[in-house]
Image (tube, rainbow, N blue to C red):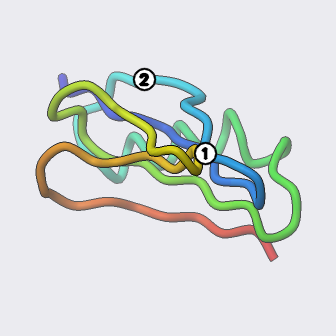
Amino acid sequence: MNQYYVVLRTKERDELLDVVDALSLEEAMAIAETRYEEQMEVRDGLFVFKVNGPLTFNEQNRFIRSGGGEMKILIRF
């Protein structure tokens, strides 16, 4: 089982919504969609990626990833 960050990006800022346990990135994305898609506004983004260390944010309140790896993104239109 792996842990994945779920980050919501709005026009104003990014927010860590959850850390989910899943067997794969695809499973983590499915969990995140089920839990959080309804609260997303138009043009919001949902980012899901494996935990590789602490999640930090810059002065514009945007997340900074530590390390590489794959990421899934859902944008609501």
Q: Which residue is drawn at 45% across and 45% down?
A: 58
Question: Between residues 56 and 5, which one lies in front from this camera angle?
Answer: 56
* Image vertical order of residue 24 relative to residue 41, above or below: above
Question: Contact (CB < 8 A) between labels 2 and 1?
Answer: no
Give the percent coordinates (x, y) of residue 16: 54, 31
**Which quadrant of the figure contains the C terminus?**
bottom right
Q: Given this view, does label 2 or label 1 mark the residue nearer the observer?
A: 1
Badge 1: residue crowd in 10 Å (few <14, some 14–19, many ≥20): many
Give the percent coordinates (x, y) of residue 28: 40, 40
* Image vertical order of residue 74 relative to residue 10, above or below: below
User: Residue 19: which disc?
Assistant: 2
Label 1 SS: strand
Q: Which residue is drawn at 32% across and 59% down?
A: 71
Give the percent coordinates (x, y) of residue 41: 87, 57
Q: Which residue is drawn at 58% across and 64% down?
A: 74
User: Residue 14: which disc?
Assistant: 1
Residue type at tag 2: Val
